[in-house]
Amino acid sequence: MIVTLAGGVGGSKFVKGLASSRYKEDVTVIINTGDDFERFGLYVSPDVDINIYTLAGLIHEQGWGFKDETYNTQNVLKDFYSQDCWFNLGDKDIATHIYRTHLLKGNYTLTEITKELCDRLGVSLKILPMSNDRIATYIHTPDGRFHFQEYLIQRRMSDKVLNIEYEGSTTASPSPGVLDTISEAGIILFAPSNPLVSIGPILSVPGMKEAIKNSKAKVYAISPIVNGGVIKGPADRMMRDMDMEVSPIGIAEFYGDLLDGIIIDLQDKKHLSALQEIGLEVLVTDTIMDSDEKKVGLANQVVEFAASHNAKAVL
Amino acid sequence: MIVTLAGGVGGSKFVKGLASSRYKEDVTVIINTGDDFERFGLYVSPDVDINIYTLAGLIHEQGWGFKDETYNTQNVLKDFYSQDCWFNLGDKDIATHIYRTHLLKGNYTLTEITKELCDRLGVSLKILPMSNDRIATYIHTPDGRFHFQEYLIQRRMSDKVLNIEYEGSTTASPSPGVLDTISEAGIILFAPSNPLVSIGPILSVPGMKEAIKNSKAKVYAISPIVNGGVIKGPADRMMRDMDMEVSPIGIAEFYGDLLDGIIIDLQDKKHLSALQEIGLEVLVTDTIMDSDEKKVGLANQVVEFAASHNAKAVL
């Protein structure tokens, strides 16, 4: 059993690799729902949708939303709301939000809805939202508190990050199956997602960290930081604002004693010995997933590296 | 003050004429909401939308929905719901349903939402939904009871109509302003809409008939039946099933003592004396509104005919 914690754009590439890897039958992905929000009365779950669309081969090349998308609904909504649509909702994508909102109104859980969307779009990899309770990631800045999506898109990551809040997480529970899956896992992987706003919210759900610590699984993070920066997203500038080292060292420090090892890019070879000195198993490899082949290759390599260090993981 | 009761496709043509007539400043339209229903969790108000889109110059030539429409959202929803979309929802049209549903969730009334949509789309004619309470028109058939939209579109008007039910109407109230507007009216017009499923539901709202009877206004119907048939819709076959005469006589009998007069088409001149014999003022004219000019012409003519018989209507 391989459990992967993942966020959106960065994480979904690795998840896509796992879904085509030799180990796809054994994989469960736990996805961040801290980015979820309501727009025009529709419930939007960005990271879950990015992963589902990616796995279904329907993702837009920009990394989110449907490919071959149109924006006719939104163009009318703009007039109704007298607002700029800072969060772009395509016409096909809106179908997902209408469906999820409708099912939520009918008291289906996010877990059930995620399963339903996967079935409808032909996605067989097992995907679980981190919680069925509402958790919202807020970014505290000198100009006030903003929902992560507002900070990311509307404010274009221009604010200094003072603090990050996972609103609702103290009273939330992991979604059904999450803790059991973790406790039965042989390998737990933190996808190369933003630690502060993708993996962090998942770890903030009560019981999650304890389950990971108590699991016999070995735990590895794939560093989203490569050569002092990120491929996409605000992780580097957020880490800098939060006084974290913008390197695999900073990633390792953030996850602390949860980690048994870390996967870093060839460009970060210079950090190898420092990471080993803090007791981590380190795989140095090409982590740039700029083709489907490289996604699958990285997934196979990471799982095999983890298994080679872990008697419990029978592959 | 001119009050017009109207349904969707047929009624909206006459309403469009009124909106460009010499009397547009004085017109209030009360619209049937008995066709309203929920689809994919979205609240859809067909007759209100047809009138607003028509007045805004945005109506599709088919008589409902937006012009220049696409169906990308619906095509994905079809897959999610494993259903044929018997009620077509275009992408732009869906924006209206999302907006209305969102505002309803925020406890706005249909009256407020209708006003808001009119403002947003540049419609200045005063439009009121008949009620802010939920009323649903059901058609009883040998195969069971169907919502009117199901009967009309999904079942293509193929069932024999045994009875018509305005569910919820006994406990509903007219929306704010409706009764006052009626009592202050000088002329009340029943648009050439289906009497059974467009004007009937409006008249079924408690207090509505009494207000019309007690009003000093004269009341005229424009017959939707021309030469034994309808321009569009199921009025003729529904009337036949309900053992009504499919002619202006059947229309006059349906409205009974509410009416002071009736406007019939030139093709129905043969009914003139029979209608006069039952005490109605009759205007025989070309009622076929196949151009904007003819819509405006008919509206002006109807209002002036009514005013010429009514000392109270100062134009």
Image (spheres, coloured by chain):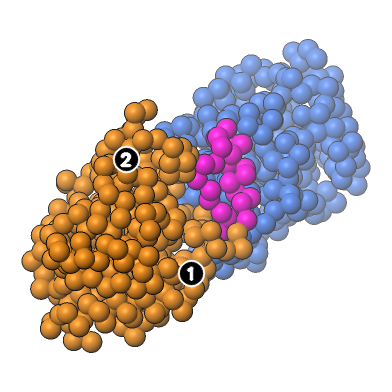
Chain colours: A orange, B blue
Mark 1: amino acid: Asp
Q: Which mark is residue A206?
A: none
Residue ranking furthest to the left: A214
Task: State if disc 2 and disc 1 touch (CB < 8 Å).
Answer: no
Quarter of the figure that contains the N terminus of chain A? bottom left
Mark 2: amino acid: Asp
- Quadrant assignment, res A104: bottom left
Q: Report if residue B273 is visible in the image.
A: no
User: Was residue A91 drawn as part of the magenta stretch in this picture?
Assistant: yes
Q: Have a look at marks 1 and 2 and say if they share a chain.
A: yes
| Chain under disc 1 | A
Left/right of residue B43 with respect to residue A282 in the rendered view? right
Q: Is residue A263 above or below residue A306?
A: above
Check disc 1 and report the residue beneath it: A290
Where does the image place residue B60, in percent across and percent down from the top left?
Answer: 74, 49
User: Was residue B177 drawn as part of the magenta stretch in this picture?
Assistant: no
- Quadrant assignment, res A298: bottom left
Q: Report if residue B211 is visible in the image.
A: yes
Which residue corresponds to the image point at 74% horizontal and 19% vertical from the top-left? Answer: B25
Label 1 to label 2: alpha-carbon separation:
28 Å
Which residue corresponds to the image point at 49% horizontal and 60% vertical from the top-left? Answer: A63
Left/right of residue A282 with respect to residue B9 in the rendered view? left
Check disc 2 and report the residue beneath it: A241
Between residue A58 and residue B6, name the one nearer to us. A58
Quarter of the figure that contains the C terminus of chain A? bottom left
Which residue corresponds to the image point at 81% horizontal and 28% vertical from the top-left? Answer: B20
Q: Is residue B95 above or below residue B259?
A: below
In the image, the segment drawn in magenta is A70-92
